[in-house]
Image: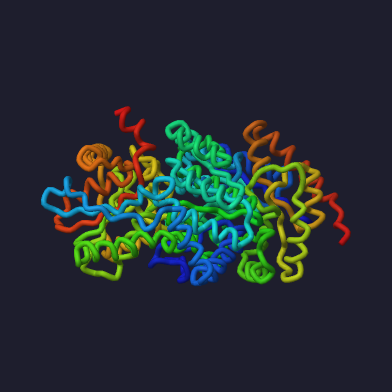
Amino acid sequence: MAVELAKGFYGPYGGRYVPETLVPALDELERGWNEIKDDQGFQLELEQLQATYVGRPTPLYLAERIGDGKRIYLKREDLCHTGAHKINNALGQALVARRLGKQRIVAETGAGQHGVAAATVCARFGLECVVYMGSEDMERQKPNVERMHLLGAEVRPVEFGTKTLKEATSEAIRDWITNVETTHYMIGSCVGPHPYPELVRDLQAVIGSEAREQILAAEGRLPDAVVACVGGGSNAIGLFAGFLADEEVRLVGVEAAGAASLGSGRAGVLHGARSSLLADEDGQIADAHSISAGLDYPGVGPEHAFLRDTGRAEYLAATDEEALAAFHLLAEREGIIPALEPAHALARALELDAELVLVGLSGRGDKDLATVLGR
Amino acid sequence: MKKVSIYLMAGPETPGLAEAAVEGGADLLEIGFPFSDPLADGPVIRLAGERALAQGMRTRACLECLAEVRARVEVPLIPMTYASILEAYGYERFQTDAEQAGATSLIVADLPLEAAPGIRRVQLVAPTTPPGRIRLAAERTDGWLYLVSLTGTTGARTEVSAQLAGLVERARAVTEVPLLAGFGIATPEHAADAAALADGIVVGSRAVEVAAAEGAGGLRDYVASLRRAVDAAQPAVA
């Protein structure tokens, strides 16, 4: 291994693989985050907004009618404001941006959930918001495009390459390179150059810390397994963070079978970090394919690649059909319409050899109705 | 003498284009090894990369192309690419095989200063780079320092970035290595303006466009026009 950077690395993964222009901005962000993350005023403001604006803590719900002998608990991030866990990260990053004096936000979005979360917090804090979105995704996720417009964000279509999340991310980073002095890049997942994977993990860790307390209160013990879907991996890393030290708890990430960066990927560099990627033998990034736009990404957060290699977490895959079956099951038996992303996690959770299972229900399914009904 | 560096994307036409660029007066050539997700590149180089990949210009084919260029020209040749290509091929192996094929050095657009210290390459500095980092980059660079003259991606602009003068000044204060300015330099006027500040210029996007539209002859004339502008450039009054 020629690359030697201890800071910002998870074993051999992570780091900063970015054009030089961005390095000082990443240093500034890292310093800013380190300064405020333990600052009491920041924590108080964040907690207050989490409670009154986001709707935290989100409930932990025992899904009695789907367990079939297991006790399956759902961590209800679908009940967050804007309908997914993405707001946890967006809210925290808006506070960071304000602290750094950045008045303009750029973000990427695939399905539109992170774009909506970014547009939402920008409206709340009076920040200018530009969201890059693949033109293909804009077509597939029209309601979210309209939401972003209503919230005052500008949505810029990305018309080249795969016209999806991968290109939208590249284009958001190019915008950041161009406007780095005035702009904060609000990345949506635990990917990208250091310190983003750590920053996003810290901001999503609230999911895991709440869930751990809640399951102990409900069951008097830790779960046998904690299961979450993994695209970039932010809801999974946030949920896992609460249980990493509990070695007896199995951590299970579930990828889309057509976008299994951890299951069938190889080490490579994309969007500023070294991780496990869908890439060919020459290092060219491959296309991902999933019914779920949120999992349709050829990369994954570097910490997940590290957790896979060390064996602390295991990563499975679910097919489009398996996710759809779990989607319908949850809707029909429990009256909860999940997003297609966590439906992948649920599909594998139902089959796990474990009695007490905690599943991250990362978002609600309204955005996926057209996709599901169109099948 | 101020330097003119011309960037060409690797491809079947590249050896002939390289020869034409040198006939036009290029002092060194950068040969792009395409990557699917080039963060530092604007639309022209990005599209050229997509085309090259569609023509099968993977790493081995690019190395062969480099060797063919080397067989035709004697100027320094510098592959310019992204870290993912080296990751997949192996960093040391890439460097060895590139040298074998005739490379003089290497540029990796998304490998910052601290990364891959064993890989000798031309370092890039940007308008955002603080003086301490410029000094470090100059110490580690291979031959010359690549000044990214603007905060942004590759591609033509209407005029040379106002950020270039300050960057040159900060770099001159800490190093004596030659400074070549790139990004946003497209016309002979730009070339003259940038050469008045720096020790040379790098032209990519416009050269790639001219090569695609007008072929070797057009590229030769275009490079010659840059050459004349650079040679006539007067030092900017400080």
Note whether A162 is above or below B35 in the view shown.
Answer: above
Note whether A361 is above or below A305 in the view shown.
Answer: above
Residue plotted at (36% across, 36% down): A368
Q: Residue B18: x and y, percent?
A: 63, 43
Relative to residue B191, is residue B62 drawn left or right? left
Instruction: Determine the residue located farthest toward the right in the rendered image.
Output: B237
Note whether A140 is above or below B167 in the view shown.
Answer: above
Residue plotted at (87% across, 54% down): B234
Relative to residue A13, is residue A23 drawn left or right? right
Instruction: Determine the residue located farthest toward the left in the rendered image.
Output: A69
Note whether B138 is above or below A75 in the view shown.
Answer: below
Instruction: Determine the residue located farthest toward the top in the rendered image.
Output: A374
Residue B31 in view of the camera: no
For the image, the number of numbered tags is 0
Residue plotted at (32% across, 53% down): A262
Foreground residue among A63 and A3: A63
Q: Residue A106: x and y, percent?
A: 56, 49
Placement of the C terminus of chain A among the 4 image quadrants: top left
Relative to residue A261, is residue A74 drawn left or right? left
Placement of the N terminus of chain A among the 4 image quadrants: bottom left
Among the 4 quarters of the image, the one containing residue B105: bottom right
Among the 4 quarters of the image, the one containing residue A24: bottom right
Q: Residue B53: x and y, percent?
A: 48, 40
